Amino acid sequence: MSISAEAVWFDEATMWVALSDGRTIGVPLAWFPRLLRATPEQRAAVRRSVTGQGLHWEALDEDISVSGLLAGRGDQTLVHAAVARD
């Protein structure tokens, strides 16, 4: 059984995700610069994938997986950008 997102909400500094196994996790918005810079309305426009294992913000071009959140991974595009400059 895979763990999926059931709800997503935000406070000033954190993205909160309620999971199908009963846990709620919070991750710093600083992990995801696009979400950090977004308006509350843009953040609220999240779409869950059919399986609930992915979160997508069309207007922000942001995709986040539940497995990535559980593994403690933030925005992976920053890692790729840094490698490309080296």
Image (cartoon, grey):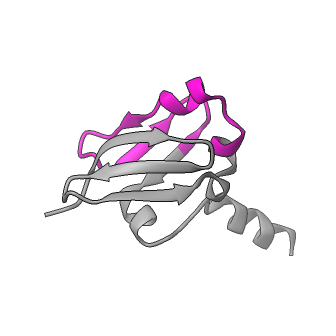
Q: Nearer the viewer, residue 48 or 40?
A: 40
Q: Nearer the viewer, residue 47 or 19?
A: 19
* Residue located farthest toward the left when viewing the structure as drawn: 1
* Residue located farthest toward the right when viewing the structure as drawn: 86
| 50 left or right, relative to 55 | left
Residue 60 placement: quadrant: top right
Residue at the spot 63% in from the left edge and 59% down from the top edge: 31
Above or below residue 42? Residue 12 is: below
Q: Nearer the viewer, residue 9 or 5?
A: 9
* Residue located farthest toward the top when viewing the structure as drawn: 41
Residue 22 placement: quadrant: bottom left
Image quadrant in which the N terminus is located? bottom left
Instruction: Locate residue 49, reporting x and y percent.
Output: 32, 40
| 36 left or right, relative to 11 | right
Query: Within the magenta stretch, is there residue 65?
Result: no
Above or below residue 84? Residue 52 is: above
Q: Nearer the viewer, residue 39 or 66?
A: 39
Q: How many marks?
A: 0
Magenta region: 35-62
Image quadrant in which the C terminus is located? bottom right
Instruction: Locate residue 72, reporting x and y percent.
Output: 49, 71
Residue at the spot 56% in from the left edge and 43% down from the top edge: 62
Instruction: Locate residue 26, reporting x and y percent.
Output: 46, 57
Residue at the spot 55% in from the left edge and 50% down from the top edge: 14
Query: Within the magenta stretch, is there residue 38?
Result: yes
